[in-house]
Image (cartoon, rainbow, N blue to C red):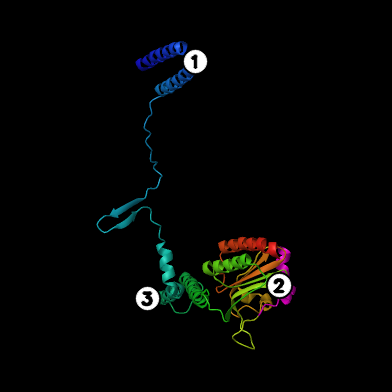
Amino acid sequence: MRLRERARLRQNSLYLGSLIELGGSQNWKEGIIRFMNIGKMEAGNLLRLNQPPQRLVHSRRFSHSRTVTLTVNASQGEIGYRGMKPRREWIADWVSNNDDLVRSMPIYVGGLSLLAVLFNRTVSGIAPVADASSSQSRADLLTLGLAVTNILNGLVWLSIRPKSISVVNPNGVECQRIASHLPDFVISELLWAWNSLSDVTCCRSLVIVYDGKCILQTGFAAASLSNGCDAVAVDSNKLIEGSLYQGVLKSASQSYLANLSLYPGKSELPFLPSNTQAVILQPLGDKGIAIISGDTIRGFTSSDQAWITLIGEKLDATLTKVI
């Protein structure tokens, strides 16, 4: 309260002095400006005095928050992590590391069960001939059936194994054919798309057919029968008449052939290497298509497919300007 009273007295005295100065000054405009400046300064001081004192707000740490601690070893310059560590699945890791043992385990269990039944029947003094009226014989028959089932299950597990997916080297020759009538900025964008796809995904060849013409063929291609050093050229007319091209343009959506060897339409792509594993057919508007082949079965992920869709839209927007 004392600070506020002092501020008010000081304000009144300053206002009074400014009024006297305004009345005695020859230049009345200068006096008014000084009066206004003094009023602004004092108003700012009063606002500062009237503001409540600021309190220090301490952040609270909730019990469910996760903390990460980094320890730095100054002598060796090493940084250690002391935080939440990923949970390990010990059983899953052991099973994956001992796949053969796990698959043959039912055979061992079934074989031991058979031996246990025979040993129990021999020790107990029961006749080796099964008697339907004996409860022990009925239990032994049930145990024998379960043991044989385990053995058969183990044999099935050993005979059926998932096929390992590996990267293959394309059987073909490398080539790069670009239409000569395209502007430089279009060529640079086509090469950018090829370099991006080949560096990030399992793409090994890229073919773009637009407006009935093949404007780009790069990467690996099938070798020509007449001359093994030359690549098979893309027959645009034959490709356009095929069911793959027509189906993609009709659906206006991407078509992913995850395992090309299972599709009969593989014969419509003779310019690709014979051991091509996967193919993505990406429409470029309603005028063309981009054929992207990979070296791994199911090698293109969902994020790769979404990214290729965006690249196709970008190429279509660029090609529409010049073609």
Left-right relation of 21 to 263: left
Circles 1 and 3: CB atoms closer than 8 Å: no
Among the 4 quarters of the image, the one containing residue 197: bottom right
Q: How packed is label 2: few (under 14 Cα within 10 Å), some, or many (20 or more)?
A: some
Circles 1 and 2: CB atoms closer than 8 Å: no
Q: Quadrant of the N terminus?
A: top left
Q: CA distance from mark 1 to mark 3?
A: 130 Å
Q: What type is the residue that disc 2 sits on? A: Lys
Q: CA distance from mark 3 to mark 2?
A: 85 Å
Q: Position of residue 28 (x, y in %)?
A: 49, 15
Among the 4 quarters of the image, the one containing residue 62: top left
- The question of residue 244 being in magenta is answered with yes
Q: What type is the residue that disc 3 sits on? A: Val
Q: Position of residue 34 (x, y in %)?
A: 45, 19
Foreground tag (1 vs 3): 1
Q: Which residues are magenta?
A: 233-252
Magenta stretch: helix, strand or loop mostly: helix
Mark positioned earlier in the residue sequence (1 or 3): 1
Q: Which mark is residue 28?
A: 1
Residue plotted at (66% across, 60% down): 317
> Circle 2 sits on which residue?
213
Nearest the camera: 246 or 323? 323
Q: Position of residue 164 (x, y in %)?
A: 51, 74
> Circle 3 sits on which residue?
123
Q: CA distance from mark 1 to mark 2?
A: 86 Å
Q: What type is the residue that disc 1 sits on? A: Trp
Residue plotted at (63% across, 85% down): 224
Q: Secondary structure at mark 2?
A: strand
Foreground tag (1 vs 2): 1
Q: Which mark is residue 306?
A: none
